[in-house]
C-alpha cells in the first residue's frame, strides 16, 4: 500500500465530485446515455466516486475491484441480454474502469475496453471530465450498436442518471 494513494483517498471527499461534475455535467452525461441507448439494446451506467472508504483502502482494494462491486450494487448485470456496461471513475486514483456483462464482454474484449479507458483518462488529465465521459459513452455505443442493435419496442432497463457514490 502506497502512502500517496492513501493520502489522496483520505483527503478526497464529495466536494471533489461536485467540482469536476457539476449538475449541468451530470445532466449532459445522462442525455448522452439516453441518446446512446436509442441506438442499441445495451444498458449503460456511469458511476463516479471521489475515493474508496478507508477500510477497503487499507485492505488494498483496487479501482477494478471496486468497479466490480459497484457493477453488482447497481445491478448492471440485471439486463435481459446480458448487455449492461458500467463506466466507473475513481477520482482519487484518476482511474477509469469499464465492467461489461458477459453478453457484450465476450464480443468486445478487454483490450478494447482498456483502449476506451485510456482515451477517457487522457481527457481527464487535461481537465476535460465531461468530455471524457461523453467520449467514452460514444465509443461504447459503437460496440453496443454493432453487437446489440436497437429493435422496435426495446425498453430502458436501467436508469440513465449518473450515480455519484
Image: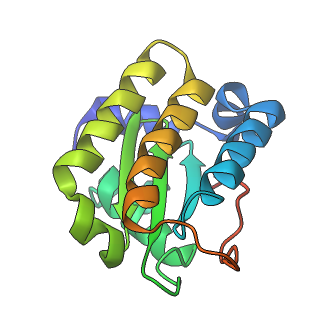
- Asked if one can make out residue 155 in the rendered structure from this viewpoint, the answer is yes
Please name the residue shown 57% across and 25% down the image: 131
Q: Residue furthest left?
A: 111
In the picture, which quadrant includes the N terminus? top left
Say above or below: 131 vs 48. Answer: above
Say above or below: 61 vs 151. Answer: above
Please name the residue shown 34% across and 69% down the image: 104
Say above or below: 29 vs 110. Answer: above
Q: Which colour scheme is used?
A: rainbow
In the picture, which quadrant includes the C terminus? bottom right
Please name the residue shown 31% across and 77% down the image: 102
**Which of these two is toward me, 23 or 139?**
139
- Asked if one can make out residue 162 in the rendered structure from this viewpoint, the answer is no
Spot occupied by residue 163 in the image (x, y as percentages of width and height): 67, 56
Spot occupied by residue 127 in the image (x, y as percentages of width and height): 53, 15
**Which of these two is toward me, 55 or 155?**
155
Spot occupied by residue 78 in the image (x, y as percentages of width and height): 52, 84
Left or right of residue 82, residue 28 in this image: right
**Which of these two is toward me, 3 or 124?**
124
Q: How many labels does the image show?
A: 0
Spot occupied by residue 81 in the image (x, y as percentages of width and height): 45, 83
**Which of these two is toward me, 52 or 161?**
161
Please name the residue shown 46% across and 79% down the image: 77
Say above or below: 99 vs 131. Answer: below
Picture quadrant where residue 125 is located: top left
Picture quadrant where residue 61 is located: bottom left
Left or right of residue 151, residue 23 in this image: right
Q: Residue furthest front?
A: 152
Amino acid at each position: 500500500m502506497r502512502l500517496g494513494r492513501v493520502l489522496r483517498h483520505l483527503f478526497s471527499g464529495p466536494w471533489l465530485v461536485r467540482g469536476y461534475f457539476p449538475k449541468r455535467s451530470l445532466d449532459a452525461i445522462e442525455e448522452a446515455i439516453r441518446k446512446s441507448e436509442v441506438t442499441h439494446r445495451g444498458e449503460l451506467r456511469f458511476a463516479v466516486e471521489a475515493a474508496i472508504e478507508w477500510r477497503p483502502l487499507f485492505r488494498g482494494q483496487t479501482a477494478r475491484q471496486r468497479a466490480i462491486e459497484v457493477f453488482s450494487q447497481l445491478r448492471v448485470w440485471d439486463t435481459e441480454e446480458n448487455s449492461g456496461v458500467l463506466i466507473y471513475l475513481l477520482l482519487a486514483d484518476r482511474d477509469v474502469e469499464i465492467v461489461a456483462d458477459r453478453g457484450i464482454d465476450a464480443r468486445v474484449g478487454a483490450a478494447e475496453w482498456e483502449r476506451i479507458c485510456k482515451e477517457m483518462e487522457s481527457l481527464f488529465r487535461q481537465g476535460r471530465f465531461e468530455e471524457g465521459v461523453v467520449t467514452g459513452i460514444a465509443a461504447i455505443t459503437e460496440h453496443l450498436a454493432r453487437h446489440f442493435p436497437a429493435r422496435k419496442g426495446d425498453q430502458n432497463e436501467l436508469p440513465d442518471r449518473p450515480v455519484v457514490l
